Amino acid sequence: MLRYILWRIAVMVPTLLIISALVFTIIELPPGDYFESYVAELRAQGEGVDNEQIEALRKQYGFDQPALLRYVYWVGGMLQGDFGYSFEYELPVSEVVGDRLWLTILVSFFTIIFTWIIAFPIGIYAATHQYSWGDYGLSLVGLIGIAIPNFMLALILMYFANIWFGTSIGHLMDQKYLSEPMSWEKAKSILEHIWIPVIIVGAAGTAGMIRRLRANLLDELQKQYVVTARAKGLSPTRTLLKYPLRMALNFFISDIGSILPAIISGAEITAIVLSLETTGPMLIKALQSQDMYLAGSFLMFLAFLTVIGVLISDLALAVLDPRIRLQGRSTK
Amino acid sequence: MTSGADLLRVEGLRITFSVLGGEVEAVRGANFRILPGKVTALVGESGSGKSAISQAIMGILPSVAQVSGRVLFNDVAAGTKPVDLLGLETDGQEIQAIRGARISKIFQEPMTSLSPLHTIGNQISEVLKIHTDADKAERRARTEQLLGYVGFAKPKRAYDMYPFELSGGMRQRAMIAMALICRPALLVADEPTTALDVTVQAQILQLLRELQSKLNMAMLLITHDLGVVANMADEVVVIYHGEIVEAGPVDAIFRNPQHPYLKGLMAAVPHFDMKPGERLKALREVSVKPGALVGDRRAAKASGPEVLVSVRHLSKTFSTRSSGWFGADTTFRHRAVDNVSFDIRRGECLGLVGESGCGKTTVSKILMRAVTPDTGTVTFDDGEGAVDVLKLEGAELKALRAKIQMVFQDPVSSLSPRMTIKNILSEPLEIHGRGTPRSRVETVRSLLQAVGLDQRFINRYPHSFSGGQRQRIGIARALALVPQLLICDEPVSALDVSVQAQILNLLKDLQKELGLTMLFISHNLAVVDYMADRIAVMCAGRIVELAPREVLMRNPVHPYTKSLLAAVPYPDLDRKLDFESLQASGGSDQQRWGAQFSDGGEENALVPADLGGGHLVLARKSADARELRP
């Protein structure tokens, strides 16, 4: 098992390397670079451009070097914690991202918790009361949740919040705290704001999870070992919690791998609509303006989360399911 | 309430299942009793409602079922008043207190009846947790004690093992421990040994018998196997289509059966005392016309060499890897087939017997070129020159495929549910480009006739047929290409006794009429005895004994063959299983076979010794033929 864990961690290295190469290629693919778009923008505004200065900048950031060398510098820098320089913000990437990263993780974390808290009881209820009115009703709500795009829900909520409560629900905190250091007041403000994006971002995920939990649990409830447990004299509730639910957890855990990046990258449009101070809007802007180090760092961050998520879910599965932990792999 | 001395009385029990488009009556007014401390066997075929009765007693019927009638449970030992189990609230406190403690149940499938995620100790001691006040240490102690008693060599270790780490037989022992830990007054055993090998079945039956008399517990034994009934039961209840047709003490039932169904059931089971040429009497005889297929085929039968298939020194090794928390992976090499040699003679039926995992199916797959062996040769000679089966490629291989066909075990999954019978039966002809579309339909019609199916069924889908009919379709498909060799891999083990007799008779007729050569694979010695001319016994990848049918049945030499024969329960009260000698012969445990039969861990220490008359037995090179005779 220990070998397995070490092996899994070792495998992450080439995976991330391949991803970084892909990310770099994709960012390099569009013609031109940040400075070209910058010059074009300045010209469009009718301003003069100092070509020498641009050339000097290019040289400074190594844009005259071959692509392979730039890739090596980029990856090498990331390994030392230097994510490069954002041209647009004229700040190192780590400073630009800074707060936003933590806010993103906060939103994601709450969203996952929200998803689980809502999806679990509803999924169990729907499975144990299959084809009842409750099941149909909850399924309908769930399907609506899947069908409505997040940003649409965000717009609707914003509209009604404005009409009914007269408040703006945009942003993750009151604007006055934006550039302030963390304080109790700021934390309170964040908590006041965070539930709206959490509900909106979590809606689709929750609905999907209810459907999957219901389907998995229904499968498990048919199994012979459930009858065995009842024949022992175990009460229906305890039977449900100890046996089929435990089995249905497996899919839940393997979900972690995909849930982490999906929540972070899936919420961009919602984040733009709600003007959240998360990484999503920033990533889109960086991609548009070819701010390559910023965009590259974001993409790498997402890739890292995916790989970590898959690792966590694999390890958790191995801990929870003795068949995975103890059974030999067939090699035939 | 006049239940008197009866432990359980079922009165006017009626169970209906509501299904799409109406109701199905599974049990129609059943009446029977279970005496305390006695074994009552409930005998019937699948779908007769016997499992529904057991579920009704436990109150664990699926929610689509409706029950009426009374099930009176008079538990004198527990000092409670008689209760009507059907009158109790569904999943209420009262029935929960009875389940697992006073009435408990073991199921047919030891694979799926235990949760794969919990240790068996956890699952067994849970019963104590529900029904007693014992603390954790005491629960563990009692569980370990019982695990040791039901046959776990290291109960302390077994407590922390997961079900998938155990063999089928050991899982069933764990199930038994789980059912008995609270010393119930009634044990409901629903086909407890059907999924097990015959030697394991004998051990489990012995264990159940022993525990039943030791704990003075009543047992409701649900089974379709009359052999098991004869060995276990005190009282027998026969159920047919949801109705109890006959009930009484085991002696009366076996020596003087009254109801035609019961008589038919007894005649339909193959047994070892059948006279040569005696036919099984199927409950519902189906008229077959193998003659419909006879054309130019008899000619092929006459010519050609005597040996059709010659198998020499086949070996196949599978490897599995496993790893612990620390340390290196260990690779287990499992010899599925180990130096197997045999001949199949033209026109004969060779039986291949062995328990699950002995490699018999792997051998058949090698013959079909579905698995590639590590070493060995297979020579096929149908009079057109001998060919090496394992080296054929392209067109030659395709030509061979038409000559070797297979009938599979599971009639449900071996037919595509999306093809009509016409498609299924004409597909082999299309693949091999035989005939025109019109002539193919004609062939399909004569095939249907030959296996005893109505020609009007030609456009139906498999789901509208019963298991036995589907197996006929499977046989017809195998015959479509006029094969030389028909491999039947457990063709009747998924079928009911009465249907089994039909299929066996069909195969026998076809073989006689068409001059087919057959390799008949089965775990059931009685079935092989009925079908085969010569029998090969396989154990752990090796053929340990090969002899003509009568010789093997009357004079087995190898200890494994002996224990296989001894473990078959006869539906005959005068020939009960001899549990003592079963223990002594050791089954598949090589260590206990005696020095002349075990290899002692050496490679190639064993060779087939010829005892004359085509009787081969695997023994040490040094062993003398006389020494081997007991």
Image: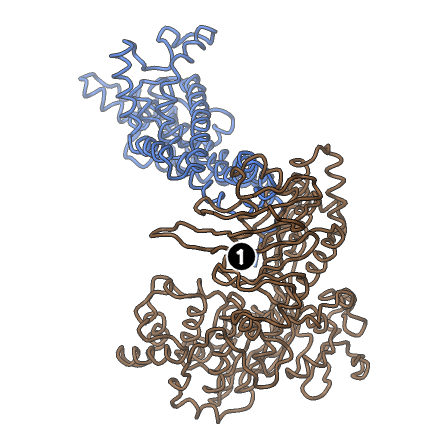
Chain colours: A blue, B brown
The residue at the point 37 percent across, 39 percent down is A131
Instruction: Tell whether A118 sits left or right of B146.
Output: left
Give B549 or A183, whichever is nearer the viewer. Answer: B549
Q: Secondary structure at mark 1?
A: helix
Q: Residue furthest front?
A: B2
User: How many discs mark residues in the rendered view?
Assistant: 1
* Residue identifier under label 1: B50
Q: Position of residue A61 (x, y in %)?
A: 39, 25
Vertical placement of A221 versus B531: above or below? above
Q: On what subunit does the disc labeled 1 rest?
A: B
Q: Quadrant of the N terminus of chain B?
A: top right
The residue at the point 66 percent across, 46 percent down is B178
Give A198 or A225, whichever is nearer the viewer. Answer: A225
Crowding around mark 1 (Cα neighbors within 10 Å: few <14, some 14 to 19, many 20+) is many
- Residue A9 visible? The answer is no
Rendering quarter of residue A208 = top left
Q: Position of residue B479 (x, y in %)?
A: 42, 78
Instruction: Tell whether B350 sits left or right of A309.
Output: right
Vertical placement of B250 versus B347: above or below? above
**Amino acid on which disc 1 is placed:** Lys
Give B430 or A93, whichever is nearer the viewer. Answer: B430
